[in-house]
Amino acid sequence: MEDVTRPDVASGVHDVAQPVVQRSFLARAEPYLYLLPAVIVFTAFMAVPVAGTMAISLTDWDGIALSGLEFVGLDNYVDAFTSDEFWRALWHNIVLIPFFVLLPAVLGLLPAVLVHQLKLRGARFFQAGLFLPYIMPGVLIGVVWRWILNPVFGPVNSTLKRLGFESPPSWLGDFTWALPTVGLIGAWAAYGFCYVLFVAGIQKIPNDLYEAARLDGAGFWEELKVVTLPGLRREMAVVFSVNLILALRAFDVIRATTNGGPGDETQVLALYMINSAFNANRVGYGTAIAVVLAVLTLLLSVLVLRLFRDNDD
């Protein structure tokens, strides 16, 4: 018996299969189509600039004429790692880390605990006032503190003279006090962020833990050590990582207060990068410093997050 395929049946099967295949392809491609705008934006504003930055760091370029661009390989990185000025700027960033990371955490934790424990009225207004310095532009903070710490007419030195200090330091102009003063300004600007984050973290800690601690005779400091601090591990990870990034990329406050002076006592990597790229017309060298700073920031941030993640586990 012959196997005869009816033309109308074959045509119908083909017509049905084609839309099914198309719908299957669209179903598989649909998630990627939703991601496509984000991928385009990320590529245009992140991937391409990062690739361009790394490419420029391998060149000797004055930042003016593309005809003067010359490929030098890793020479800029070698120059950076063999430069005393680079290591001195990096050391200043390291000195600022306790001021930008640890001190704001302490200054934000104590009022957060007090507001939670004492159930203070008007806590929202108190919280908004503490958070205000964090949202202020760094340049504005620098200008205000430069006026406050002015050695001639600033209110700080005027008050110290009334209290009997005949020759208070010039703070931002003193070779000994300039860097710690900048660090204290940075701590003042960052502690509001720590306070708000710690308040939110404390509110999610179950009250049963505090009640159990009080039944065991725990006082204020025991509650802080046994209940509050363990319950704020995730918030501390965020605070330390964010403030660590601020310490490593510190620029605006320093530029507005000391501009790296006196001498180079407050010159940090970001300021050294800007001066090298634009003042000395060494854009390739300055870009190499930017790459080193970005890699260092990434490594230390990942280290902090892993440290708190391991403790949390």
Image (cartoon, rainbow, N blue to C red):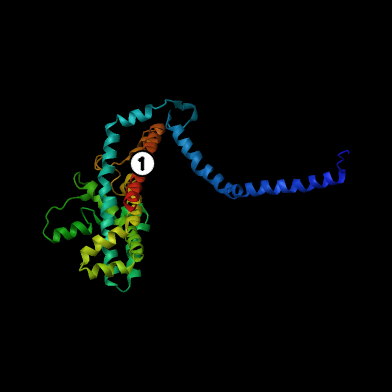
Instruction: Give the residue furthest to the right.
Output: 1
Relative vertical location of residue 192 with respect to residue 210 in this rendering, above or below: above
Dividing the picture into quadrants, the one containing residue 197 is bottom left
Which of the two residues, 277 or 132, is positioned nearer the viewer here? 132
Q: Is residue 228 left or right of residue 28?
A: left
Relative vertical location of residue 183 with respect to residue 296 in this rendering, above or below: below
Give the image location of residue 141, x and y in percent: 32, 55
Relative vertical location of residue 73 with respect to residue 137 in this rendering, above or below: above
Dividing the picture into quadrants, the one containing residue 231 is bottom left
Instruction: Give the residue furthest to the bottom.
Output: 121
Counting labels gives 1
Q: Is residue 43 visible?
A: yes
Q: Is residue 252 visible?
A: no
Residue located 39% across and 34% down the image: 288
Q: Is residue 226 left or right of residue 24?
A: left
Give the image location of residue 248, x and y in percent: 33, 44
Give the image location of residue 205, x and y in percent: 34, 64
Give the image location of residue 189, x and y in percent: 31, 56
Residue located 70% across and 49% down the image: 23
Which of the two residues, 238 or 148, is positioned nearer the viewer here? 238
Disc 1 marks a residue whose amino acid type is Leu
Dividing the picture into quadrants, the one containing residue 270 is top left
Specify few, some or many for label 1: CA neighbours under 10 Å numbering under 14, 14-19, or 20 or more: few
Secondary structure of residue under mark 1 = helix
Instruction: Give the residue furthest to the front.
Output: 1
The N terminus appears in which quarter of the rendering? top right
Residue marked by disc 1? 299
